[in-house]
Image (spheres, grey):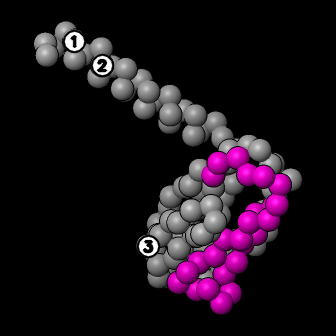
Amino acid sequence: MTARVLRPAVLAAVLALGAGTAFCQSLATYPVVIKNGRIEPARLEVPAGVKIKLTIRNEGPGPAEFENLDLRVEKVLGPGGNSFVVIHPLRPGTYKFFDEFHPQNSEMLIIAK
């Protein structure tokens, strides 16, 4: 393959990555903080039928995990770690998230309305 044929393909891939990044930044974004085995906010209302982005920050001294088995969401963060998850459009209902490292007192409910 010549360089002339390869360049448009590389350019298309770079543009597609940029469009994906811009799309993620335009989603409704909700902050989530995990600290000392607690997830805050404990209850979060979001619109049903819309993709959402959750930014997750671990402010605790040890590892934390943000998880929902039914939605197949799992994010493990070290101390001071930051990340995000994008959740597909939810049907109306309640979705329970937890920190598997602290299951006894870490629960967050996302209510899609």
Residue 68 screen position, x and y as percent = 62, 68
The span shown in magenta is: 87-111
Which residue is drawn at the image coordinates 37% and 20% (left, top)? Answer: 12
Q: Which residue is mark 2?
A: 9
Check disc 2 and report its element: helix, strand or loop.
helix
Q: Which residue is mark 1?
A: 5
- Identity of the amino acid at label 3? Gly
Label 1 or label 3, whichever comes before in sequence order: 1
Question: From the viewer's perspective, is residue 9 above or below residue 4?
Answer: below
Residue 101 screen position, x and y as percent = 53, 84
**Mark 3 burial class by Cα count in 10 Å: few <14, some 14-19, many 20+:** some
The answer to if 60 sits in the magenta stretch is no
Residue 62 screen position, x and y as percent = 47, 82
- Whether the residues at callouts 1 and 2 have beta carbons within 8 Å, the answer is yes
Residue 78 bears which disc, if any? 3
Q: CA distance from mark 1 to mark 2?
A: 7 Å
